[in-house]
Amino acid sequence: MSRTTRMLATVALLALPWACGPQQEQEASDVTPAAAEPPPYETTPVAEGVWQFRWQGHNALFVETAEGTVVVDPISTEAAATFAEEIRATVGDQPLLAVVYSHRDADHATGAEVIRAALGPDAPVVAHENALAPLQQAANPDLPPPDVTYEDEMTLAESSRPVVLSHPGPSHSDDQSVVLIPDVGVAFAVDFVSLDRVGYQELPGWHMPGQLEAIQHLLGLEFDTIVFGHGPIGDKAAIERQLAYYEALAESVRRAIADGLTEDEAAETVHLEDFASWGQYDEWFSMNVRGMYRLLSEG
Ligand SMILES: [Zn+2]
């Protein structure tokens, strides 16, 4: 492997929150110290007026419009302080138009008050309506409930540069928002899709067949570039491959259930060779089988 390839592989690996333990140590010892320590955060231009902010293994997005900056996912209280500085350094003294939650999971949605305090205390938090009740109930000051919610679709900065939020239905969670910036063909989707990587562990809290329908929803949007909540940026073809993966996973587990296999037996025997090179396959694929087995058995 060339040094450049090794460096890229290491950066990609370290960008994952779950990339820890022996594998990481092995990679780290394989390269020079400088290459083994990628910056803990970075702001990367994605398209005109659209940036990805990465904090360790989590990605967020911000969009400049004439009405102000739209920020999607504060990530954490610690990340949000740096995120706000990065936004200020990138777009200057623009007002904050809104803080959007891709979904209510704490590892993406925590920290809105830090962003608001730094950039615009009066800007609303916007999320899908299914995020409202659970966050009201949780009453976590670091993860406030949304001030504005929507059901199917909502457009921010409509009169200047539309930023379109749409709900793909229940998938990884029941309150997902996909963000689309039509004028540059950029989308942002978190946790229910990624670049050539299997699903998270045993797919906790996921929905079927909603997961397949949510990916179909994404495919129906017009974009060329898609930023994910974790890992590298992808394109439309990456979403086609995600659909192929989850369809193949569901089909093979469905067949195992029809053949009378137990969950343990399915986890042992189901393999998808076409996806064996994907990220986290060795670690999580049999867990995906277990998760899918339970989702399909629930009827
Ligand atoms: Zn999540």
Image: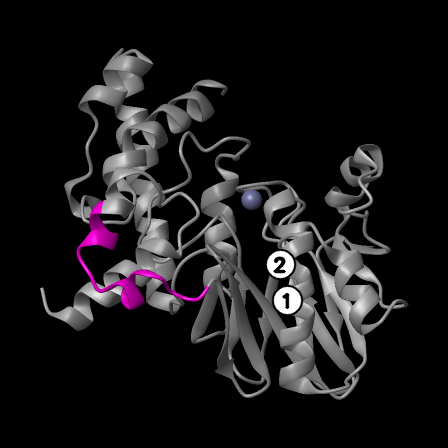
Inspect the magenta stretch and tell me whether residue 28 lies in it.
Answer: yes
Q: Is residue 89 above or below residue 287?
A: below
Instruction: Classify residue 48 by image quadrant.
Output: bottom right
Total labels drawn: 2
The kind of secondary structure element at disc 1 is: helix
Dot 1 surroundings within 10 Å: few (below 14), some, or many (20 or more)? Answer: some
Identify the colour scheme used: one colour
Residue 210: horizontal and vertical position, in percent? 52, 41
Label 2 to label 1: alpha-carbon separation? 5 Å
Residue marked by disc 2: 79
Residue at the (20%, 47%) spot, across then down: 26
Q: Is residue 41 above or below residue 49?
A: above
Q: Which mark is residue 65?
A: none
The kind of secondary structure element at disc 2 is: helix
Residue type (three-letter) at the residue carrying disc 1: Thr
Residue 188: horizontal and vertical position, in percent? 54, 65
Task: Between residue 135 and residue 210, name the one nearer to us.
Answer: 135
Task: Between residue 231 and residue 209, name the one nearer to us.
Answer: 231
What's the magenta region? 26-39
- Is any atom of residue 73 visible in this view? no
- Is any atom of residue 72 visible in this view? yes
Residue 297: horizontal and vertical position, in percent? 43, 18
Residue at the (28%, 14%) spot, across then down: 264
Residue at the (58%, 52%) spot, across then down: 168
Mark 2 touches mark 1? (CB < 8 Å)? yes
Inspect the magenta stretch and tell me whether residue 197 lies in it.
Answer: no
Q: Which mark is residue 82?
A: 1
Task: Between residue 102 and residue 113, name the one nearer to us.
Answer: 113
Task: Between residue 235 and residue 137, name the one nearer to us.
Answer: 137
